[in-house]
Image (cartoon, helix red, strand yellow):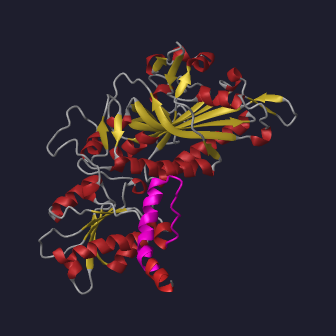
Amino acid sequence: MEVLMHLCHHKLCPLLPRTLSRACRRNHHCTPQPSHSVHALAKPVAPTPLVSRLFQPSNLREGQEGGDMTCRSQRLMLQAGLIHPSNPGCFYYLPAALRSMEKLVRLIDEEMQAIGGQKVDMPALCGAELWKRSGRWELMGKEMFRLRDRHDIDYCLGPTHEEAVTELLASQSTLSYRQLPLLLYQVTRKFRDEQKPKFGLLRGREFYMKDMYSFDISEEAALHTYQSVCHAYGRLLDRLGLKWVQVQADTGNIGGTLSHEFHLPADVGEDRLLMCGNCGFSANFETVEPGQADCPQCHTAPLVESKGIEVGHTFYLGTKYSQVFNATFTSAQNKPAVAEMGCFGLGVTRILAASIEVLSSEDSIRWPRLLAPYQVCILPPKKGSKANEAMHLAEELVQSLGNSLLNLKGEVVLDDRTQLTIGKRLKDANRLGYPYVVVVGQKAMEEQPVFEVVCQQSGDTVFLSKDGLLDLLSGAETI
């Protein structure tokens, strides 16, 4: 009997796992137990970005003029595969451009939240009833995209959100003065039916904007908030390394009693700016009396005209909207009071294009360093060349930079198109504007490897050891 049991055990045991496995597949109640192995719990490791795998279709080939594209940024962004045209004034934002835009949004978030901003997301589809109450349904004219649903109710695609945010605040019946100032902002798509969209992302019909709306207890407090946001805009543009000017502006169809624009001086700019070299007065041409040649502030110097690309606009609204929508709060005297408002816009996609416009050469993109899609591009040797054995050094360098320098995590790309010469790949890297291009060539095969480093921002080329390279790149600022 004991021998028989031993034989049965010997024959059946190898079959049990397979039998149970088949039974589990037949019976949906049988659920496999989770694995507790180290590999199962480990986070997936992001693969090294390879240039050959990046989706960057070139829309304009070398030698093409680009038709009626008189704007440098539009041509460069198309050539580099950053954007692709869709409908007039509308574009696909391709992966490299989207990386840059996400960095810009993170930078905007930092600055807006540093002054107390809270991020929200409001519907792009806005009811006509709100716009009719504010009187802007007709005032906006043909710039507004309008549509009607199956119930014959009118809507628009929001070009701005003063009505929507004020209605949101008015719905909060328990708002106290202790909760003010309240600064609500969003980064979202906006829509304007431009008659003649042009200059790529500088004047489109669908674009990304940061719009912030402030609510304060008094005019004095609202003006303090206004200055706080203006200073934040200045810090943002300074961090991007852009030359900018703040000018007195018209309130237009937004309304209010005080307004300023933030411009990047550029010949392609559509705004005419007037500035005084004596007292610092600056204004949009629209706000100055026709024919006035001398400064209206100091009356001692002439006004000098230049052009600018508007990237930001601020408004002190007072109670223009809050009175209409009854956006109130409970005051310190326990009485209802109407909130004082401001609104503040930043053109997100316009900043991207405008920065390329003012910083780049005719054939190569130069980014604000913080906004470059990738900070470093590694160029291994050409396949079949004398330096071919250094290929493994290039691959190791990519991993080493990402692991050794936290600021470069996800910021290093390998140009693995080794069928092309170093020169051809250098030209492509120069066109896209990587801040640092590292060439792994013949000198990398020496006993003490040396790497050629092209610093795109300055145009300098230096030769560094690995330690020297790490030291240089450790100072690369990222967001």
Looking at the image, which is closer to me, 479 or 318?
Answer: 479
Residue at 57% from the left image edge and 29% from the top image edge: 161
Which residue extends farthest bottom? Answer: 447
Residue at 41% from the left image edge and 31% from the top image edge: 206
**Residue 238 screen position, x and y as percent:** 48, 52
Which residue extends farthest front? Answer: 1
Residue at 50% from the left image edge and 61% from the top image edge: 32
Residue at 54% from the left image edge and 54% from the top image edge: 29
Q: Is residue 8 left or right of residue 268?
A: right
Is residue 174 part of the magenta span, yes or no?
Answer: no
Q: Is residue 116 above or below residue 462?
A: above
Q: Is residue 391 above or below residue 209?
A: below
Looking at the image, which is closer to me, 438 or 102?
Answer: 102
Which residue extends farthest top? Answer: 152
Q: How many marks?
A: 0
Q: Is residue 172 visible?
A: yes
Q: Is residue 448 above or below residue 451?
A: below
Q: Is residue 250 visible?
A: no
Looking at the image, which is closer to me, 99 or 284?
Answer: 99
**Residue 171 screen position, x and y as percent:** 71, 29
**Residue 317 screen position, x and y as percent:** 63, 29
The quadrant where residue 172 appears? top right
Q: Is residue 313 above or below residue 435?
A: above
> Most prominent secondary structure in the magenta stretch?
helix
Tell me which segment is drawn in magenta: 9-37
**Residue 8 screen position, x and y as percent:** 45, 77
Q: Is residue 16 left or right of residue 114?
A: left
Q: Is residue 223 left or right of residue 175?
A: left
Is residue 36 part of the magenta span, yes or no?
Answer: yes
